[in-house]
Image (cartoon, rainbow, N blue to C red):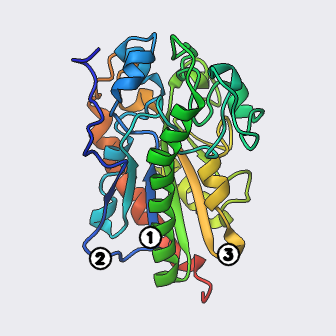
Amino acid sequence: MEGDLAFLSATLPPVEIAAPAEQTLPLVFASPHSGSYYPRDLLAATRLDALTLRRSEDAYVDAIFGAAPSYGAPLLRACVARAYLDPNREPYEFDPAMFEDALPPYVNRTSPRVKMGLGTIARVVASGEEIYARKLSSGEAMARVERLYRPYHRALKQLLGVTREKFGFYLLVDCHSMPSACLGDRGRPGRADIVLGDCHGTSCHATVMDTMHRALSAKGYRVARNAPYAGGFTTAHYGQPGAHGHCIQIELSRALYMDEQSFERKPYFSRLADDMSDIMLALAAMAPSLSPTA
């Protein structure tokens, strides 16, 4: 596996922020699952091969939305693989069955995500295979949260706070990809290329959802709302329309832009990235309507 995956070095930061020279838009883009660094302690503990371990990774999503800084909006990216630590969760969503010792009482043991094996530290990859060949210690879990989860959310909160202070509000776009298998058979009526999630109308003004849906549909994409993904922790936690904070989640079918078995990019990758740049422009044009002073 060592030749197939990148590794977390002692000097690698937990997050990267691609920042514009000057932020001119009230938009923030985040990619919590495109991290491609795999710490050695994960590789020592896993029972999976390299490609299977990557099944949970939102490969290349940060690159697909990479034009954000050129339009005046920052892009936040987690550097470490989701299979090691998932920032799009509560800080302590842990499955007790994964651990050799007792967990603290404040741990959320019963969330739907934990029951699926996809907590803050996942038990399985997205395709369902068990990640670990041994049980973890609670100390390992807590160390990952402190080293990786906390810095990601500190950085995100800072970006959103600066944006709201400057513009009076923010619009966070939480960027993801999804396995095409979760959408059923290709060609099935209702099958989506892109799923938009606003926690069923609670995480952002309806104009945000309508703008993105309309712009994506105009480009020929089949767009679904809130099914099968309505938004994760980030969308629900930072989507506070009453406090002038808006958040929407976007899920891109991986079949659009990559071979899901080999992880090789398809020729359509560049077209998809260009289309996401156009979506940024559509959001930029719409954003002033979200201002408290509008």
**Who is closer to the viewer here, 282 or 10?**
10
How many marks on residues?
3
- Which residue does the image show at 46% across and 53% down from the upper left? 152
CA–CA distance in space, label 2 to label 1: 15 Å
- Please, what secondary structure does the residue beneath circle 3 have? helix
Residue 199 location (% of width, % of height):
70, 51
Q: Which mark is residue 243?
A: 3
In the image: residue 186, left or right of residue 272: right
Residue highlighted by disc 1: 284
Residue highlighted by disc 2: 22
- Which residue does the image show at 67% across and 34% down from the upper left? 228
CA–CA distance in space, label 3 to label 2: 24 Å
- Residue type, numbered disc 1: Ala
Residue 119 in which image quadrant: top right
Q: Establish if 45 lies above or below 73.
A: above
Quadrant in which the C terminus appears: bottom right
**Which numbered disc, 3 or 1, marks the residue closer to the eye?**
3
